[in-house]
Amino acid sequence: MTPLFAAANLWEIFLQCDLAGQIITVGLAISSIITWAVMLGKRNDLADLRRLNLAFEQRLREERTLLDLPESFRNKRVIPYADLFADASEAYWRAASILKEKGEDSPRARLEHAENAIQRAIARQVLRYESSMIFLATVVSGAPFMGLLGTVWGVMEAFSAVAGQQSAGIAALAPGISAALLTTIAGLVVAIPSMFGYNFLLGKMKQLITEIENYASSLADRIELESVR
């Protein structure tokens, strides 16, 4: 069967479906297009963020001190690693200023404020990594059920047609069976790629989360070493 003939055959089956089957099929087709766009966009976003993170981390490794770096290092908050560094540095010096005014300045207190800021920044960046994943998880779990709904609806329509005409002719069964089969296929076509894409992105996201936690630990260690000098 050639692709052109298969497409024409599917179009004929779609035309034989009742209104409910056509609505479900069109809805699944739109969901598939949106899902592919989201998955490709998310893959590119995660790849870009990882590249920016590694470049910023390498830049910090080349610096002998962190707490005295210029303002330009704290103005790159679009980079997750830079956002952590900016929050940690600002919290450290803000705590130093306040504690100095009170005459209670201590390296340990400044470090605790910096570590708390790092943890808040990690939580914020994890939410950024996880964006769009809920939508993909919803499609993965919801598409088969939409296909199943179309299947049940189509079978019900087929039995209703047979009962109304008191015959089991192919003309009576065709619309309902067409809707049942087409919506089942549409649900699987949406759910299967979405499942693989979701699991792939979930693995990449977990990798980025592990890397940012390791970076945060290294950042806190360097700030601690500098604060006790």
Image: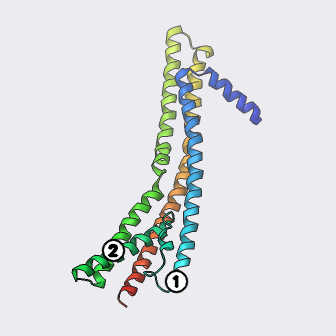
| SS assignment at label 2 | helix
Mark 2 neighbour density, 10 Å: few (under 14) some (14–19) many (20 or more): some
Q: Position of residue 104 (x, y in %)?
A: 23, 82
Q: Nearer the viewer, residue 209 or 55?
A: 55
**In this rendering, the label closer to the viewer, 2 or 1:** 2
Q: Nearer the viewer, residue 60 or 1?
A: 60
Report the side of 128 relative to 228 (left or right).
Answer: right
Q: Position of residue 12 (x, y in %)?
A: 68, 24
Report the side of 32 relative to 3 (left or right).
Answer: left
The correct choice, above or below, for 51 with respect to 19 in the image is below
Amino acid of disc 1: Glu
Report the side of 212 relative to 5 (left or right).
Answer: left
| SS assignment at label 1 | loop
The residue that mark 2 highlights is: 94
Amino acid of disc 2: Arg
The quadrant of the image that shows the N terminus is top right
| Real-space CA distance between mark 2 and mark 1, rounded to the nearest whole angstrom | 22 Å
Q: Residue at x 36, y 85 (%)?
A: 227
Q: Nearer the viewer, residue 155 or 211?
A: 211
Question: Can you name the residue that lies furthest to the top here?
Answer: 165
Mark 1 neighbour density, 10 Å: few (under 14) some (14–19) many (20 or more): few
The correct choice, above or below, for 222 with respect to 144 in the image is below
The residue that mark 1 highlights is: 63
The correct choice, above or below, for 9 with respect to 197 in the image is above
Q: Nearer the viewer, residue 133 or 163?
A: 133
Q: Residue at x 77, y 35 (%)?
A: 2
Q: How many marks?
A: 2
- Circle 2/circle 1 CB separation < 8 Å: no
